[in-house]
Image (spheres, rainbow, N blue to C red):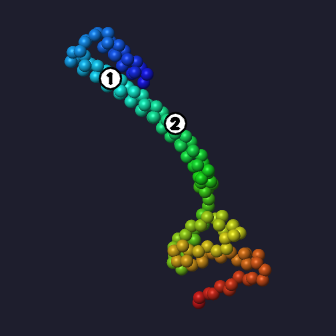
Amino acid sequence: MDNLKEKVAYLQGLAQGVQLGDSKEARVLSEVINTLQVMAEAIDNLQLNQAEVEEYLVSMDEDLADLETDVYDDEDDDADAEFLEMTCPNCSEELYFDQLLLDDDEVTELVCPSCGQVIYEDDDWYEEEEGISPPETEEND
């Protein structure tokens, strides 16, 4: 905006060079030029503030991109996950479980989220505990 300030300064020089005196037109012209000078300074301040905000916004965008990379980096791995479809024997709800859950040594059972019925139980975990055998399953005839 230096160009705008230069133009206002040029107009001030022209107005002084014309020597209009103390006429009404001279006062109006002087006030118009002073107003233009104030506006040029205000625009210059706005541009400086906008540049600072833009720099801050670019910095925030970079930080957000880093955060997204950290948080959602594993999301692409989940896209290739295989899901096992099961039907709950109690409520007939169709359920989908990540196949990796069944291979996980720490997962001993899967529970239906709708009715709470155990729909999968890993009997191998009993073998790891000494002296514990799996409970007998009851069959309803």
Q: Amino acid at mark 2?
A: Glu
Residue that carries the numbered disc 1 in the rendered image:
34
Left or right of residue 47, residue 15 in this image: left
Asked whether 16 or 66 is in front, the reply is 16
Q: Position of residue 116 (x, y in %)?
A: 55, 77
Q: Residue at x 67, y 70 (%)?
A: 107
Asked if residue 115 shows in the view, the reply is: yes
Q: Amino acid at mark 1?
A: Asn
Residue 13: quadrant of the picture = top left
Q: Position of residue 11 (x, y in %)?
A: 34, 16
Q: Is 44 situated above or below 141?
A: above
Q: Is 52 situated above or below 121?
A: above
Residue that carries the numbered disc 2 in the rendered image:
55
Tag 2 secondary structure: helix
Residue 8: quadrant of the picture = top left
Q: Nearer the viewer, mark 2 or mark 1?
A: 1
Left or right of residue 29, residue 13 in this image: right
| Outermost residue toward the front in this view | 22
Q: Position of residue 100 (x, y in %)?
A: 66, 64
Q: Residue at x 61, y 73 (%)?
A: 110
Specify the label residue 82 is tagged with.
Answer: none
Asked whether 58 or 50 is in front, the reply is 50
Asked if residue 76 shows in the view, the reply is: no
